[in-house]
Amino acid sequence: MTSLQKAENRHEGYAARLLRKTFSRWSARIGAAWIALLAVVAVFAPFLANSRPLWVSVGGHGYSPLLQGLTWADIGWLAAFFGALLLWSLPLRFGQRLLGLLAIILIASLIGKAALKPRTIEIYEQYREQAAQYDEVIYTLVPYSPRDYQRDRGDTGFQPPSREHWFGTEENGADTLSRMIHASRVALSIGFVATGIALVIGVFIGGLMGYFSGLFDIIGMRVVEIFEAIPTLFLLLTFVAFFGRNLYIMMVIIGLTSWTGYTRYLRAEFLKLRDQDYVQAARAAGLPLGSILFRHMLPNGVAPVLVGASFGVASAILAEATLSFLGLGLVDAPSWGQMLFQAVRFSSFNWWMAVFPGGAIFFTVFAYNLIGDALRDAIDPHLSTVEE
Amino acid sequence: MLSYILRRLLLMIPTLLGITIVVFATMALSPGGITAQSLVDDFGMNPQEKAALEAYYNKRYGLDKPAPVQYLRWLNNVSPIGFEVSEEGTLGRFSWRKGIDLGESFLYGRPVSQILAERVPITLLLNVLTIPIIYLISIAVGVRAATDRGGRFDITSSIVMLALWSIPTMLTGVLLIGFFASEQYWHWFPPSGLSSLEAARMPFLPHWERFADVARLLGGMLAGFAAGAALAQWRNRTGRIIVAVLVGLLCATGMIDALPHEFSWVAWFWTALLLGGVFYATAGSDYPALRLVAFAFFGLCLGGALGAQWGASGFVRGFLLDRLWHLVLPVFCLAYGGFAFLARLTRSAVLENLQADYARTARAKGVPEKEVLWAHVFRNSLLPLITVFAALLPGLLGGSVIVETLFSIDGMGKLAVEAVKGRDREMVLSITLISGFLTLVGYLLADLLYAAADPRVSYD
């Protein structure tokens, strides 16, 4: 690095410097690359794996069954992806970008829900049966939908990987690769949303506890202790068994059971920061409490919380997989853990049901852990494997 | 000190109350909740019978009362001091020693305490075996990684440990059961349970018919051990790698040959790649103790297996060996995540102390580096390891939920899943109470050990 660049770097903010240091490590880059790949796969899932052909032309009349079959969730994902690309290319503040993104997702999903008629019954077999009549047809990379049980082909349950089904088929005869592609949405969204919920609760309570200390702190710490003394998995099991098993409830539940760590981190940071001069100055200037806490103190105390969050995303994904594996998972969507569950549930061992979905869980969790590890070393370099 | 312990024990009471309130509220607020209707399986029952059964459940568990009353009633039953409860469910006089009553399980129809007394020892057995393994491996790896900071061992071990930590327990369990405990592949270990059916009739210790068999087995183990140790000690790194990889490939070929189905090159390739890779990495490592332990252990197992192959007549496994044989896979599943986590923690603790001023002083006055490490640095690095012990205990309880379900071991973890799935209120509350209590005791123990290990910490 030349001295000129160094001088420029002195002007970069704390967050920018952390990011630069984190992603200067190849392990963090590999992790980020895997997450990015997963995000692309999740956003374009219906374009990658679908029984509906991408393009069909019959007697000079061309149309796309795939586009006709998109659901409001697909619209929401696409809007989120392109919205994020747009917002991050504009010069906005982080909070504005986040709010903008949420608004875009909400609006797109609502429009999608209003404009698209939901199909109650999908007959995927028709596209294979009518294949002979098509003049021209373009299939997606994996020409099977996650819920295409291939009834037209007889019993296709538990076929080992072949040229037809790259990752084999699951118990009901659907293509495993297609289910995995669509399940990446569950993994990605549950990781982010559950951690987001936990972060909001943890930062709010932890911030107030650290800032006010005293009685508020004592009561708060008891609440934190209560939630920590119940083994997380057991708490999760209880919540899920008694409240139901849809994706959104699951996200909220995982978020509700994992906020204590963030509270502890932020409380410790705020206890240190509350007597700093700039906080005293902000208080003396009569700034409102929200401004002191979140504009002035939070950016200086957020680093350990961020490290915790990137490990938290990994454990949220693991939590979902574990619940699915114990038979308490989602009933309405394919998920990696549920596929893993099928590997040993029956008398025979189906290795492809263990290796591929299990490998996907492992790589995703590993990727988040690599990023978290690099982030921690960037914040606190005196213990890292790389000597500076 | 005594007053500190008493204070901490008293502080546990509000926390335990909070824990049970959280869990009770979850159950009471859930859609449907827990009512007599939800307990009665009304299949093939006429309305009078159903109503009678519901009335019976209502009376027995007080399910028709409002939720707060139900909670207070439960609380009165479990607390050692409180009101005596008569057979009809009415409250009697206040008593100081009425004893703890955990209630009866909805699911099993037996007292909860009885069921717990059966299940707790099994989970404890798993954990008692697992914890020493976790500590041994993580200290060995962590201390070496810290002293070799920035070196090859440090970088590879930190990546490997992070990877191990990221492997979900259920994936490992599924793969181990699928490949090493099923008829389709290598049927080396039992897939489920803690002992075979015939183990009940076996003598406790293993038994051989002829002395020659024992000699063969011991001879095989000894030879394997010696060969492994010799390979590990060989100074020529290239030679070591070549021999180790060749042994790995040979083993892979043998394993594929032992499969019940036809020889397949694809299977051979993956097995050979995996075994060869592990052997290559171990032989190439510049950590002699790791090489020694790994190769000597491998030689011991291989030699023992070959020795046992030759004379297998009249061998009775015995109860002890049977139990151990059943425990290998579950304990491995429980252990690897723990040592992966703890090794990283050990590394940072030792590293922090290696850079401390007192370590520099010791070096400056001429203390040998080995003594600096073990007599000064290591003892100070024990503190975080002690703290983690408290966190490890409930963690292992949680971890054993998956392992026990997978391997069908009737311990606490499996019981917890069954209770939650079956909406067995008394059982869920009792398990919450006990695991919460254990966790809090773990924290207290950690704090006390902390004071014992570090004279600067005092609670008086």
Image (cartoon, coloured by chain):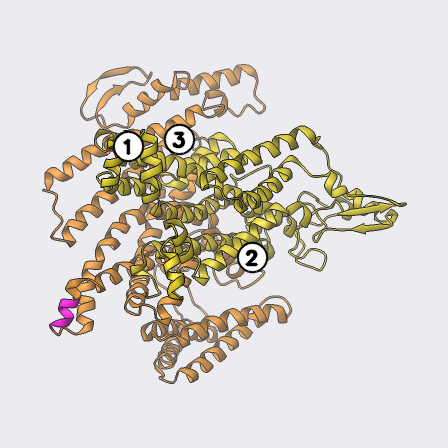
Chain colours: A yellow, B orange
Q: Residues within 10 Å of mark 2 (few under 14, many from 20)?
A: some
Q: Is residue B336 magenta?
A: no
Say which chain tag 3 marks: B
Query: What main secondary structure does the magenta stretch of the protein show?
Result: helix
What residue sits right under mark 1 in the picture?
Answer: A220
What residue sits right under mark 3 in the picture?
Answer: B105
Q: Is residue A182 left or right of residue B193?
A: right
Residue B138 is situated, as x and y percent measured from the top left of the image, at 32, 61
The quadrant holding residue A382 is bottom left
Q: Which comes sooner in the sequence, label 1 or label 2?
A: 1
Examine the rendering and report whether any part of residue B186 can be seen. Answer: yes
What residue sits right under mark 2 in the picture?
Answer: A355
Examine the rendering and report whether any part of residue A323 can be seen. Answer: no
Residue depicted at 71% across the width and 60% down the height: A163
- Mark 3 vs mark 1: tell me if same chain: no
Q: Nearer the viewer, residue B157 or B149?
A: B149
The quadrant holding residue B150 is bottom left
- Mark 1 vs mark 2: tell me if same chain: yes
Eyeballing the image, is B225 above or below A24?
A: below
Q: Nearer the viewer, residue B60 or A239?
A: A239
The Cα–Cα distance between marks 3 and 2, rounded to whole angstroms, is: 39 Å
- The answer to whether marks 3 and 2 mark residues whose Cβ atoms lie closer than 8 Å is no
Q: Is residue B448 left or right of residue A13?
A: left
